[in-house]
Amino acid sequence: MSDDGVHGRVRASYDTVAEEYRKRIGGELAFKVMDRALLGVVLEAAAGGTVADLGCGPGHITGWLGERGAAVGVDLSPAMVAVARREHPGAEFRVGDLLALPAADGEFAAAVALYSVIHLEPGELRPAFEEMRRVLRPSGVLLVSFHRGTEVKTLDEWWGHRVDVDFRSLETDTVADLLTEAGFTVTARLERDPYPEEAPTRRGYLLARRT
């Protein structure tokens, strides 16, 4: 999508909040017990292969994965990638769009997309999942997480910064069906209530395998 479209607005918004995002979100895995457990499942499934962190933000999840295996972070925002490279110099980071990932066919053993698909338009979800399938090796595992529901929340101010970005809540069945259409087999579904430190939304997780 062109820079003056939705993806351009998302990119500019995350560029604007990159440093503040790191300060507020960069330590979240310390209290996200379920997320750490699911990331462990992904690492085990990768069996020593490289895990892609798609929509990596300031790189904290990529860094966590990289401390336990091989990981590559990808994010739409150049400012986020710059922060990630500074904070996690031992990991690899690339600037890229979920609809055109900067990776070769079958490059990754597994991938995670944690709350990154919530910025896509509804018609972009299946193409994004097809692109994720492309960069995974056969039988590669994908973990997707999202806010549950049907709400679309538009922010024009975020932590004191002017932004223009939509957050789309998603229904678990909808995401599961789109993953199936894109060439995945959904192997596990989980939901949880928010932790006290999080925004008050119910969270959904889907674990899928590339067919």
Image (cartoon, helix red, strand yellow):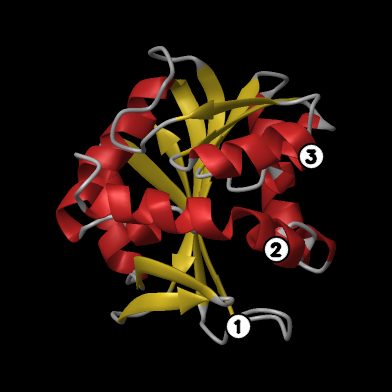
Residue 198 in sight here: yes
Identify the secondary structure beneath mark 2.
helix
Distance between the Cα atoms at labels 3 and 1? 30 Å
Q: Is residue 12 above or below residue 103?
A: below
Q: Residue at x 36, y 55 (%)?
A: 10
Q: Residue at x 22, y 58 (%)?
A: 121
Distance between the Cα atoms at labels 1 and 2? 18 Å
Residue behind mark 3: 87
The x, y position of residue 12, in whole percent, is: 40, 52
Circle 3 packing at 10 Å, graded few (<14), some (14-19), many (20+), is: some
**Which amino acid type corresponds to the residue marked 1 in the rendered image?**
Asp
Q: Is residue 60 left or right of residue 31?
A: left
Circle 1 packing at 10 Å, graded few (<14), some (14-19), many (20+), is: few
Q: Is residue 145 above or below residue 93?
A: below
- Residue 1's quadrant in the figure? top left
Residue behind mark 2: 25
Q: Earlier in the sequence, mark 1 or mark 2?
A: 2
Q: Is residue 209 left or right of residue 17?
A: left
Q: Is residue 163 above or below residue 48?
A: below
Residue 188 in sight here: no
Tell me, yes or no, whether the two marked residues, 3 and 1, touch with CB atoms within 8 Å. no
The x, y position of residue 94, in whole percent, is: 53, 26
